[in-house]
Image: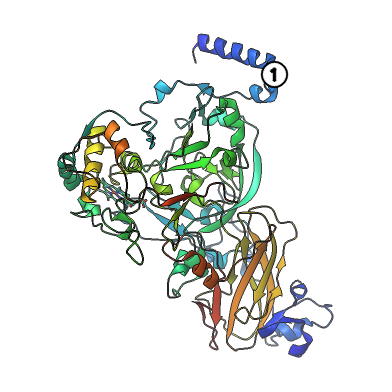
C-alpha cells in the first residue's frame, strides 16, 4: 500500500471512530483496499441481469468449429455426451417420465452457460478460450438445443435476451428452514 | 447366564443401552462377564516380543500402525474425460467416535486439487460493499478465530438409495460422503463488516481458486450467521483436498456450498445462478418444479457396524454403533431396531451433543443366529424425525438424488452376511 493510501485509510479509521462505528471492528482492519477496476481479470461472475459480461461475440456457425475442436472428445459430436454428466442437448421436463436434464431442457438462465464455460470449460484446459470464443461456442450449444438461430450474433446484449425453456421451473428455497 | 437375564428392550435381541459399558466387566449385577465372552481354558499369556526390545524413536510426523493400513478412503478411478473430478468416501465402518481423521475425511472435487502457495493466495471481498478489500493468508491469521465441531456432508451422499433397487454396498460406499471435524476460522461476518455491507446486498457469491473456479451463491442473512472462513481442521492447516489454504464453512449445509480454496466473495443483489446451483445440486420434485438453494442437510443416522458387506462370524453380543447428525440442530435421540422397524429401543448417545455435529450412538445387541434387519432412526433438537426410505421417496420422488436422509436397513441373514435392503 502506498503511503498516501495508508494515510487516507488511517484518516478513514479516525473518522469512523468519531461517527461511532465499533472500535473493535475497526481495530481489526487488516484487509488492503482495492478498486473494482483492479479486479477486471479476476472477477468472472456473469449474472442474468447482464452484469459481468465481457465485450466480444459471435455466432453458432463460428462456434461449431470451436466445439468440434475443443469439446467433442467429452461431449460428443452432437452434444449427446459421453456420460450422464456431459450430455448438453435434449430432454424434456414435462413429457419424460424421468426427464433428462440438460442445458436445453433444465437450465433457467443463459447467463449460467456463459459463466460456467468461461470459468470451467474445456475441462482439460479451463479458461483457455477468449471471450468471443466463449460466446461462439455457447451460441452453438444453445443452437443445438433449438433455442437460438445459428446466425444470431451472441454478445453481452443479445445473451441477456435469450429465454430458456425452463426459466420458470425453479423455486428459490434459500430461506426455507 | 440365560438370555432372559439380559434386559431386552426391543425385539430380536436389543439390550438395554445401560448394559453397554458394563458388558464384560465384573460386578454388573446379573450381567456376568465370563458367560458372555467365554474364557478359553487353553490360553496362557506370555510377555510379547515387543516388550523385550526398545521400540522406534519419536518422529517429526506421525503415522498410523501398519496394522491399520487397510483403513482407506474409497476413491474412484481417475477419468481422463473428467480431469480431477470425483470423490473419496470415508471408511465409516472402521471409524469410531465423532471426529474423522483429516486423512480419511471425505472429498469431492470438480476439477482436482490445486497446489496453492499461501503466500500468493488472495481472498477478495467486493461488490456491494463500502470498501472492496483483499486479504493475504498472513493478514487472516491475525484475526480472532473460533473453533467448532461440525459435520460436513455431500448433497449427493446416500443418493443411490433413491434408486429402485437396493445396491450391494457398504456403509462406506453408500454413505461415506459424510465426515466430522473441528473447524477453526474467522466468522465471515467479521470480514464482511470490515468491508462494510451495502444495504442493497442480499447474496454473497463465493468462488474457489480451483480449475473449475467453483462458485456458489449464499443468502447474506445466512452468511452473517454461523458461516466461517475456515483455516484449520482438527488443529492443523486445512489440507489441500479440503481447500488449503482456506475454505468457506457453512455449518449443517450441503458440502458444495462450503467452497474450497476460497478466493472471491462478491456481494450482489441477486444470486449468480452458478451451474452448480442450477444444473446440479437442485431438487426436481414430482411436479417437475425444481427447488433451488436447498441448503440444510436432513436429520439422519446410519449404523456403521455391523453394516453392509460385513459378516457376523458367530452368535452372541455385538455393539451396534453408528453416527447421527442434523443440519438443523443437535441430535436428541437415536433409536435402533433389529426387526426392520417394528420395535425400537433407545441407543446411548454421548451427553454433550453440539449443533450440526456428528453424534456417536451405541446399543448392545445379541444375535442368536436368525434373520434380522438393523435400522436406526434419529430425532434432532427441533423435533425432526428421520423418515423411512419409502416415505422420503414417496414425498420427493427420485428425479433428483440429492439430500437422501431416509432410514438405512441392513439385513442380517442366518449365515451372518449383512446387506443393504429396502425394508
- Position in image of residue B202 (x %, y %): 53, 35
- Position in image of residue B359 (x %, y %): 66, 60
- Position in image of residue B323 (x %, y %): 62, 64
Q: Residue furthest bottom?
A: B2
**Is residue B397 placed above or below B181 in the rendered structure?**
below
Is residue B324 in view from this perspective? yes
Is residue B22 in view from this perspective? no
Most foreground residue, A159 or B368:
A159
Q: Is residue B67 left or right of residue A41?
A: right
**Is residue B10 placed above or below A51 in the rendered structure?**
below
Most foreground residue, B396 or B175:
B396
Q: Quadrant of residue A136?
A: top left
Screen quadrant of the C terminus of chain B? bottom right
Residue tagged 1: A20
Q: Quadrant of residue B357?
A: bottom right
**Is residue B45 placed above or below B200 in the rendered structure?**
below
Most foreground residue, B238 or B220:
B220
Task: Say what secondary structure mark 1 lies in.
Answer: loop
Screen quadrant of the N terminus of chain B? bottom right
Q: Residue at x 17, y 43 (%)?
A: A150
- Circle 1: is it few (<14), some (14-19), or many (20+) Cα within 10 Å? few
Q: Quadrant of residue B230?
A: top right
Q: Is residue B6 left or right of residue A167?
A: right
- Position in image of residue B197 (x %, y %): 56, 28
Q: Residue at x 24, y 53 (%)?
A: A75
Q: Is residue B44 left or right of residue A145?
A: right
Please name the colour scheme applied to the rendered image: rainbow
- Chain letter of the residue beneath label 1 in the structure image: A
Amino acid at each position: 500500500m502506498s503511503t498516501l493510501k495508508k494515510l487516507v485509510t488511517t484518516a478513514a479509521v479516525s473518522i469512523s471512530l468519531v461517527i461511532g462505528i465499533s472500535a473493535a471492528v475497526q481495530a481489526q482492519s487488516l484487509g488492503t483496499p482495492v478498486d473494482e477496476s483492479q479486479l477486471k481479470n479476476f472477477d468472472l461472475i456473469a449474472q442474468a441481469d447482464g452484469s459481468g459480461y465481457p465485450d466480444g461475440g459471435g455466432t453458432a456457425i463460428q462456434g461449431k468449429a470451436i466445439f468440434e475442436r475443443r469439446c467433442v472428445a467429452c461431449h460428443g459430436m452432437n452434444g449427446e455426451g459421453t456420460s450422464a454428466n456431459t450430455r448438453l442437448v435434449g430432454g424434456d421436463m414435462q413429457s419424460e417420465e424421468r426427464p433428462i436434464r440438460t442445458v436445453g431442457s433444465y437450465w433457467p438462465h443463459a447467463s449460467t452457460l456463459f459463466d460456467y464455460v468461461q470459468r470451467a470449460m474445456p475441462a482439460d484446459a479451463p479458461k483457455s478460450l477468449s471471450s468471443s470464443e466463449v460466446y461462439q461456442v455457447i451460441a452453438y450449444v444453445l443452437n443445438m438445443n433449438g433455442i437460438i438461430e445459428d446466425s444470431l450474433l451472441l454478445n453481452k446484449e443479445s445473451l441477456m435476451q435469450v429465454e430458456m425453456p425452463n426459466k420458470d421451473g425453479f423455486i428459490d428455497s434459500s430461506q426455507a428452514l | 447366564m440365560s438370555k432372559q437375564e439380559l434386559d431386552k428392550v426391543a425385539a430380536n435381541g436389543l439390550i438395554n443401552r445401560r448394559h453397554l459399558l458394563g458388558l464384560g466387566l465384573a460386578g454388573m449385577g446379573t450381567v456376568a462377564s465370563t458367560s458372555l465372552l467365554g474364557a478359553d481354558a487353553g490360553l496362557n499369556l506370555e510377555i510379547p516380543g515387543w516388550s523385550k526390545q526398545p521400540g522406534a524413536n519419536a518422529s517429526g510426523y506421525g503415522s498410523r500402525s501398519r496394522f491399520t493400513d487397510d483403513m482407506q478412503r474409497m476413491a474412484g478411478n481417475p477419468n481422463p474425460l473428467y480431469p480431477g473430478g470425483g470423490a473419496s468416501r470415508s471408511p465409516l465402518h472402521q471409524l469410531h467416535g465423532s471426529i474423522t481423521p483429516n486423512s480419511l475425511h471425505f472429498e469431492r472435487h470438480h476439477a482436482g486439487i490445486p497446489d496453492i502457495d499461501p503466500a500468493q493466495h488472495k481472498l477478495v471481498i467486493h461488490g456491494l460493499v463500502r470498501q472492496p478489500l483483499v486479504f493475504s493468508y498472513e493478514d487472516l491469521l491475525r484475526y480472532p478465530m473460533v473453533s467448532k465441531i461440525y459435520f460436513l456432508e455431500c448433497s449427493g451422499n446416500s443418493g443411490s438409495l433413491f434408486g429402485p433397487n437396493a445396491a450391494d454396498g457398504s456403509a462406506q460406499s453408500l454413505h461415506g460422503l459424510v465426515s466430522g471435524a473441528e473447524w477453526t476460522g474467522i466468522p465471515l461476518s467479521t470480514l464482511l463488516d470490515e468491508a462494510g455491507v451495502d444495504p442493497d446486498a442480499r447474496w454473497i457469491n463465493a468462488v474457489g481458486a480451483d480449475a473449475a473456479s467453483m462458485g456458489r451463491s449464499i443468502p447474506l442473512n445466512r452468511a452473517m450467521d454461523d458461516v466461517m472462513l475456515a483455516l484449520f481442521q482438527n488443529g492443523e492447516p486445512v489440507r489441500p483436498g479440503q481447500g488449503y489454504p482456506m475454505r468457506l464453512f457453512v455449518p449443517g449445509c450441503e458440502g458444495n456450498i462450503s467452497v474450497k480454496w476460497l478466493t472471491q466473495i462478491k456481494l450482489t443483489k441477486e444470486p449468480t445462478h452458478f451451474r452448480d446451483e442450477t444444473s446440479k445440486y437442485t431438487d426436481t420434485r414430482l411436479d417437475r418444479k425444481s427447488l433451488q438453494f436447498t441448503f440444510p442437510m436432513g436429520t439422519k443416522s446410519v449404523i456403521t457396524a455391523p453394516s453392509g458387506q460385513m459378516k457376523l462370524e458367530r452368535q452372541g453380543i455385538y455393539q451396534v454403533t453408528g453416527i447421527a447428525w442434523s443440519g438443523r440442530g443437535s441430535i436428541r435421540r437415536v433409536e435402533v431396531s433389529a426387526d426392520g422397524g417394528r420395535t425400537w429401543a433407545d441407543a446411548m448417545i454421548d451427553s454433550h451433543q453440539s449443533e450440526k455435529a456428528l453424534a456417536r450412538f451405541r446399543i448392545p445387541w445379541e444375535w442368536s443366529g436368525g434373520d434380522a434387519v438393523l435400522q436406526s432412526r434419529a430425532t434432532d433438537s427441533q423435533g425432526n424425525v428421520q423418515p423411512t426410505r419409502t416415505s422420503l421417496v414417496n414425498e420427493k420422488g427420485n428425479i433428483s438424488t440429492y439430500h437422501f436422509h431416509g432410514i438405512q436397513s441392513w439385513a442380517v441373514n442366518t449365515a451372518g452376511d449383512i446387506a443393504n435392503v429396502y425394508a
